[in-house]
Amino acid sequence: MFLCCMKTVKDAYDVFRSGLKDTYSNSETDAITSLVLTDITGLNKASLKAFTGTELNVVQSEKLLTIIAQLKTGMPVQYILGYTDFYGLTFRVDPSVLIPRPETEELVEWILRTIPLNNTQNILDIGTGSGCIPITLKHNIPDSNLFGIDISSIALQTAKHNAEVNKVNVTFIKADALNLNEPVIASQRYGVVVSNPPYVTMTDKQQMHHNVTDFEPHTALFVTDQNPLIFYKAIADFATRHLINGGYLFFEINESLGLETVEILNHKGFQNIELRKDMSGKDRMIKAKWLE
């Protein structure tokens, strides 16, 4: 039914809007459609908007039909395409890793604006997932030594692939963020420790879109309502022992627990603690300095 209706780029936008009206808003659908059409046709977003009469061949229309069927299940478009862009780089993503968000790009930007970019230093990302944070930092601070850990072997395979594709050298190691005694990691001192750990509570989960809860890895997302800051406490403890004097701890956080997270860092002796909002005006990230 839809195949005969998708003869042009404009038709594709119309069909996607109609087919996904119960899943996404029109603006979300248009953004998703642009990503899909760029992938299938090779046209950039500007060309798609300027030349809506561009014809689609049968193969392209069939691919669009397959993708719209997957999107109707709630599967994120990034998993369907198999990649996403982050801070100007391209990363493979699959259901073993979280899809990198714009808020995490903001966190990376904050790190790059804070630390010296011409020094050799060790930087550790805890809960690395796709590797987007250490790979991007290594790309922009090539003299630094980047480490990424994750408890998931499959996620680490994805991260290693992304490092190879983006032509940077990052050391990825399997380790548990709640028990950071892996020798290679525990033997280092770091100029920066950064983490976007699990922080979504079971209460928060009830408000989330099913394309997140049904498809993205739960071990990277969820914590209990009873101990929602468990990862922050463990990582902060590790940082007090392994940050150099004047080193920084960066966190992406639960917007509802910003003040509580700041209090943990205060209690553990961190200084110059700064709670920052993201582009949506939500408390989303923290920077803290360690002074011995």
Image (cartoon, rainbow, N blue to C red):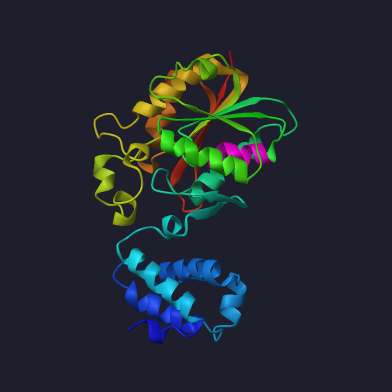
User: Residue 265 at what x, y percent from top left?
Assistant: 45, 24
Q: Is residue 255 left or right of residue 106?
A: left
Q: Nearer the viewer, residue 290 or 215?
A: 215
Residue 29 seen in render: yes
Seen in the picture, residue 269 relative to 263 is either above or below; the reply is above
Kindly identify the residue that appears in the image at 48 percent across and 83 percent down: 10
User: Residue 233 at what x, y percent from top left?
Assistant: 39, 23
Q: Is residue 139 left or right of residue 218?
A: right
Give the quadrant of residue 42.
bottom right
User: Residue 287 at what x, y percent from top left?
Assistant: 54, 32
Kindly identify the residue that appears in the image at 43 percent across and 49 percent down: 94
Q: Quadrant of the N terminus?
A: bottom left
User: Residue 255 at what x, y percent from top left?
Assistant: 39, 43
Give the quadrant of residue 187.
top right
Seen in the picture, residue 68 relative to 164 is either above or below; the reply is below
Q: Is residue 135 left or right of residue 12?
A: right
Q: Main secondary structure of the magenta part?
A: helix
Outermost residue to the right: 118
Highlighted magenta segment, given as a residue range: 131-139
Q: Quadrant of the C terminus?
A: top right
